[in-house]
Amino acid sequence: MCVFASSQFSLERVLKQTKQQWPETTVIGASSAGEFTEAGETLQAISGWALWGDFEVRAAMASGLTESPETVVTALAGKLNERFDSHPHRVGILLLDAMSGRGEETTLLAATLLDDGDPIRLVGGAAGDDLAMENTWVGLNDRAEEDAVVLAFLHSKAPFGIGVEHGHQAHSEPIAVTRAAGNVVAELEGRPAWQVWKERTASLAAKAGLDVDALEGNDLARFFFTHSASLASGSEIKVRAPLRRLDDGSLSFACGVPEGSVIRVTDSDVGQQIDSARAAAEQARAQLGEHPCAGALVFDCVCRKLILGDGFAGAVETISSTLGGAPVAGFETYGEIALDVSDHSGFHNSTTVVLAIPQ
Amino acid sequence: MTATGHVSHDELREALQSALGQERADAAIRNAAAALSLKGNTFTHDEGLEILGKVAEHDGIVGISARFARSRLMTRWATARLDAVRSSSD
């Protein structure tokens, strides 16, 4: 069972109460920035997703991501190496603390260190905190922690379906990352990162009726999520959302952005967001083959609600209807995880990730 | 990836660019190949793995993405070799 709770609630308390109701069930969870099911979307709420049927589930949690994602993932790997001949299909659900700034690193290390010759498939999300951008939590059973990651493997007799899509496009001229360490970009084009970022986004902000110099707190977080950075990857782009502006004018991201990389400013519109939700659901549905979809778990970037507004619930309905009317539940994330067998990267921003469960 | 046990610079770059961006991925492959005195744009699989191994010496996201790419390419190439052996013995 998965529970996703607004930061208005204690995640640990929510987990404990859930576990009390269903003591035999593995419960994983994350703090969130919006909660939804196919019946609707709301804020300051809790959404839940339960899986029942012929599945095997194993889960573990470890903390210390900021210090060493490798140590953390190695600890998980030691607990999650079981395979089931009767249930040959496997997918991992990865939930992590966005504020650790280790999203991509943790995802790639999990796929590397847990690879037993059968490449691992992962989905998941980076926890949220209702755009406060302060503390995000993940949990397992009766415990919740910051700076942590939870990994749950689902083992099934039939294949799972994974879909991921974003609806953003790059706008600006290239911007060189000239000084960075880990997930903190200190300089762009040789000047303080925020100074350059606000210059390059000022016209987009003005179109949205915003004065980029006046943005603070939640408004700044909203602006970052709707006007993110992107890396070029062939004909595609990979979105990288700044999470915070630090006191020295650096920008902090949810994963490493290497020095020497080149970013561009992105934005999106309502139509692109609806189309990308449908595309993610179609990808996931196709991978189920002949099996009907029993339901889906959805990790949706918080930016999608910011762009879609009241239309967000309609986008969730689109996912459900594309999956044949299947029930869905999920949360609004600060980063999404989707890594299939042919992928070389698994951490995303501004996407919809759909995990379709086979009947 | 070629069927003859070779890999191009572009294919190695593609294995890194979705995590690093194509400009940083391109520089990482170019610098690693130069450090290993490997010239040209096409490498044997072993040389390709050496290049990714060299990139994997970097800290943080650059090194981690290279370790992951190396692991996935090793699996993919081993699977392709096994398939080739199986089809030739049929």
Image (cartoon, grey):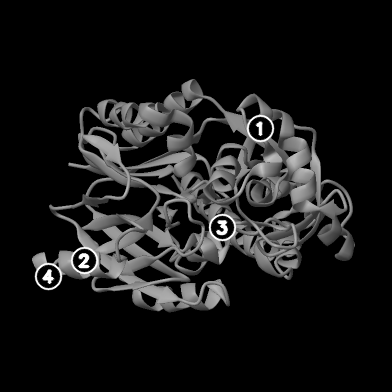
Pinpoint residue A173: horizontal percent, then vertical percent: 80, 33
- In the drawing, does residue A161 fall left or right of residue B71? left
Q: Nearer the viewer, mark 3 or mark 1?
A: 1
Distance CA(mark 1)–CA(mark 2) = 44 Å
Distance CA(mark 3)–CA(mark 1) = 28 Å
Mark 4 lies on residue: A20
Residue toward you, B22 or A19: A19
- Sequence-earlier tag: 1 or 2: 2
Circle 1: residue type: Ala
Distance CA(mark 3)–CA(mark 4) = 34 Å
The answer to whether marks 1 and 2 sit on the same chain is yes
Evaluate whether residue A206 shows in this view: yes
Mark 1 lies on residue: A205
Residue at 20% x, 70% y: name it. Answer: A16
Where A274 sits versus B14, above or below? above
Tell me whether circle 4 and circle 2 mark residues in contact (CB < 8 Å). no
- Label 1: state its secondary structure: helix
